[in-house]
Image: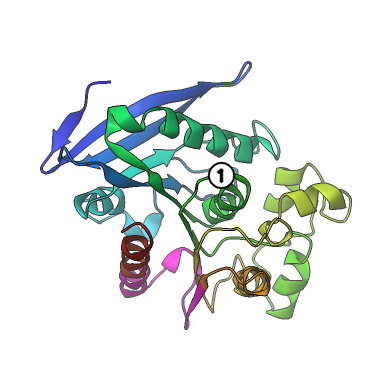
Amino acid sequence: MRPHRHGDVRFWRAVEYATVPGFRPLLLDVYRPDTRAAVPAVIFVHGGGWHVGSRSSVGPTFADWLPSPLEQLAGKGFAVVSVDYRLTGEARFPAQLDDVTTALAWLRDRTDELGIDPQRIAVWGESAGGHLAALLGLTAEGVAAVVSWYGPSDLSEFPSDAAELGISVADPSAPDSREALLLGGRATEVPELAAQASPVARVHENAPPFLLIHGTADRFVPHRQSQRLAEALEAKRVDVRLRLLAGADHLWLGSPETARTAFDLTVEFLRERLA
C-alpha cells in the first residue's frame, strides 16, 4: 500500500480488507501520524441504523470539521482505521459483527507494516457503530478500550425504553424498524438472536474499559440503553464511564458545542487507556 499525505497525517483510502462471496468488497481507510514510532490505533465504526452510512462519516454535525474528526484524531497521535461493513439491505446480523471482527484481524496482521502497537488497539463507534464497537470489544480478544456514542445495547428492551421516554420518531417494535431489519424479525420473534446482538448480554468480567456517551434528549436511541450497558459492566466490575450530556439529541444534532465535548472526552479517554 502506498500512502498519501495531508500535513502531518499519512492516509490510505479504499483499502480492501475482505471479500465476501456474493457481496461488494469491504473497504477501510487508514489515517496515521507521520512518524516512525509505533502508535496506538482506533478502529472507527460508522452509524446509520445499520442500513445507511459509510466509513467516511462521523455524523452530520461533524460535516464542517476541517480537518475531519478522524484526521484530527490521527493528528493527536493515533492511527485511525475507519471501516465499512455490510448493511441490512445486504445481510442481517451477525454479518455486521463478522465484518468488523474481520477488519480487526486485518489490522492485527498489518501492525508491523502500518507501524501500530498491537497491544494498544481501541474501538470507537457512533449509534449503530457504537453498538458494533461494543460487541466487538466484548467478543474479540485484545481490544484495549471501547468508546460508544449513543449506541443501542439491549435490543429486547429497546421498545420499552423508547416508550418510557416517549420516543415516537420510529417504532422499534415495527416489522420494518431498523432493529427488525438487523435481526430479520422483531426482537420478540427472534429472542435468541436479539440477545446475541445485544452488548448487555455479552458482558463479561474480562471486558476492556468502556466510555459511553449519550444525550439525555436523544430521540432515536433512548439514553437508558447506555445506562443498561453501564450497569451490566459495573456488575462485572469492569471499568466503565458513563457520560450523559444534558439536553443533547442523537448525532449531537443542533449542538456543535456538544459534539466538541464528546470528541474531547473521547480523545481524553483514549489517551488514558492507550498510553
Q: Is residue 177 visible?
A: no
* Residue located 62% across and 16% down the image: 21
Residue 191's spot in the image, x, y percent?
86, 53
Q: Quadrant of the C terminus?
A: bottom left
Q: Which residue is mark 1?
A: 141
Q: Locate residue 108 relative to residue 99 in the image: left or right.
A: left
Along the viewing direction, whichever of 60 and 27 lies nearer the viewer: 27
* Residue located 31% across and 30% down the image: 112
Farthest-out residue, bottom: 246
Q: Is residue 225 magenta?
A: no
SS for tag 1? loop
Farthest-out residue, top: 21
Q: Locate residue 160 relative to residue 97 in the image: left or right.
A: right
Q: Is residue 255 magenta?
A: yes
Which stretch appears magenta?
A: 241-262
Residue 239's spot in the image, x, y percent?
53, 70
Q: Is residue 59 above or below residue 256?
A: above
Residue 271's spot in the image, x, y percent?
31, 62
Q: Quadrant of the N terminus?
A: top left
* Residue located 44% across and 38% down the image: 83
The type of residue carrying mark 1 is Glu
